[in-house]
Amino acid sequence: MTKLELFQRYAEAWLPVFVARHEIIWSEVNIFDFFVGAGMDVAGKEGSALRLLRAFEGQKAYLGRPGLHVSLRLSGADGENVKQLKRALAARQADALPVNIEIKQADFAERFAAVKGELAKSSSANLLIIDQFGI
């Protein structure tokens, strides 16, 4: 099993804990990936962002529930990778999911500082991916 396969399985197991509960405890569910790549590697294998999209697709029935706000917050320092990722997500029709998908070009320190306050909210469940790609 590769690191990305393990990561995808983890996300698929983590997400329903927070979105599929009968009673909504955490009104905001956020997944942050601070080191996105272009969406696919040179061999055409999906990167973390597209694998996260698969996890969301598997929970689609729960994502649009009233009182639940689900976000996928992606960022990376490389502008070209961010552009390619936007195209890859559009090709996968990511906007059809009831998920707020945000993609920003920013380095880790800048982006983490911008969202740090949100991470402390007791009304949110947050999964943070802090794993540089390509090293």
Image: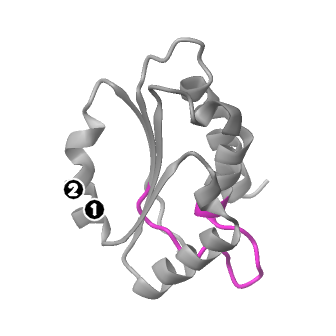
- Relative placement, left or right, of 17 versus 29 is right
| Mark 1 burial class by Cα count in 10 Å: few <14, some 14-19, many 20+ | some
Residue name at image x 62 percent, y 50 percent? 97
Is 95 colored magenta in this rendering?
no
Residue at image mark 2: 114
Residue name at image x 71 percent, y 52 percent? 54
Residue name at image x 67 percent, y 64 percent? 93
Identify which residue, 20 or 106, lies in the foreground: 20
Identify which residue, 4 or 121, lies in the foreground: 121
Residue at image mark 1: 111
Residue name at image x 68 percent, y 78 percent? 41
Identify which residue, 26 or 81, lies in the foreground: 26
Is 45 colored magenta in this rendering?
yes
Q: Position of residue 29 (x, y in %)?
A: 45, 36
Q: Is residue 3 visible?
A: no
Figure check: 47 above or below 124:
below
Mark 1–mark 2 distance (CA, rounded to whole Å): 5 Å
Do the residues under discs 1 and 2 have CB atoms within 8 angstroms? yes
Q: Which residue type carries mark 2?
A: Ala
Q: Which residues are magenta?
A: 33-50
- Relative placement, left or right, of 107 versus 18 is left
Q: Secondary structure at mark 1?
A: helix
Q: Which residue type carries mark 1?
A: Arg
Figure check: 70 above or below 84:
above
Q: Position of residue 48 (x, y in %)?
A: 60, 61
| Mark 2 burial class by Cα count in 10 Å: few <14, some 14-19, many 20+ | few
